Amino acid sequence: SISMELMSEYLKRNLKPRRYTHSLGVVETATRLAEIYGANREKAHLAALVHDIAKCLTQEESNRLVRFYGLPWKYRNNQPLAHSKLGVALLRDEFGVTDEEVLSAVSYHTTGKAEMSLLEEIIYVADAIEPGRDYEDAPRLRALAEKDLHAACLEVLEFSIRDLKSSHREIDSDTLKAYTYLRQIIG
Ligand code: DGI
Ligand code: FE
Ligand code: FE
Ligand code: FE
């Protein structure tokens, strides 16, 4: 597997500056949450660093890779949804990443899923609350995430679902399952 330094160099050269800065923000937040909740810090660091590796593909490149990797039809013409799944494919094929926990955290960082692992949940939440995110509720969610990760995750999911509804985009089944599952266990 490729080293963190080489990965970082690749991302710096291939992501837009804003996206690279976002990724470093997710590293900062995810490693902090990993320490608080006792997740593997190195895995959190790697997953956070690479989570948006496929974010800067054009819609055309995304469609080509969706076809190449035989991803389900719903990922066609939906780069914002496909980038997490294509990220996993590229990390496996081009970078020799084999850690399934890390790959799964990348795979579900956009939608979440039911019964997320600690690492998956940390990356999902960190993506939404890293220091560069500047929506109104961000400071409150950052504080909440350090006290109650599930509660913060549920709020991020609610926010995301509301946003998707208001712009008439289809809510992915994993997003819905993530929401329903957390609602059920939080009570
Ligand atoms: O890649 P980031 O911008 O850091 O964040 P992200 O990976 O969470 O991607 C956010 C995008 O993903 C945003 O455009 C909305 C989209 N998205 C997230 N959940 C769903 C979704 N799109 C659809 N259609 N359905 C979802 O459930
Ligand atoms: Fe993303
Ligand atoms: Fe997200
Ligand atoms: Fe991201």
Image: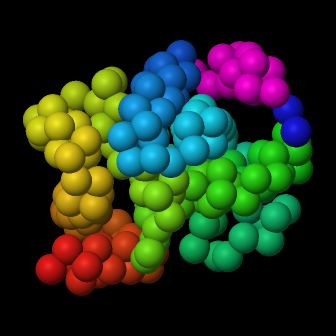
The residue lying at 21 percent from left, 59 percent from top is 151
Q: Is residue 48 magenta?
A: no
Instruction: Check residue 11 for magenta coloring.
Output: yes
**Which is nearer the eye, 1 or 74?**
1
Please say whether residue 170 is visible from this viewpoint: no
| Image quadrant containing the C terminus | bottom left
Locate residue 47: give its quadrant: top right
Residue 81 placement (x, y as % from top left):
52, 58
23 relative to 21, above or below = below
Q: Position of residue 170 (x, y in %)?
A: 38, 72
Relative depth, front residue between 19 and 123: 123
Q: Is residue 131 left or right of residue 30?
A: left
Which of the colour schemes (rainbow, by chain, secondary structure, one colour) is used? rainbow
Kindly identify the residue that appears in the image at 63 percent across and 36 percent down: 42
Count the numbered circles shown: 0
**Which residue is pictured at 67% across the width and 76% down the height?**
72
77 is higher (above) or lower (below) than 80: below
Q: Quadrant of the N terminus?
A: top right
- Where residue 153 sits: x, y (%)? 29, 57
Q: Residue furthest front?
A: 38
Q: Which residues are magenta?
A: 3-16
Q: Main secondary structure of the magenta part?
A: helix
Residue 53 appears at what percent x and percent y? 65, 38
Residue 29 visible, this angle: yes
The picture quadrant where one finds residue 2 is top right
Q: Residue at x 66, y 17 (%)?
A: 12
Front residue of this view, candidates 22 and 187: 187
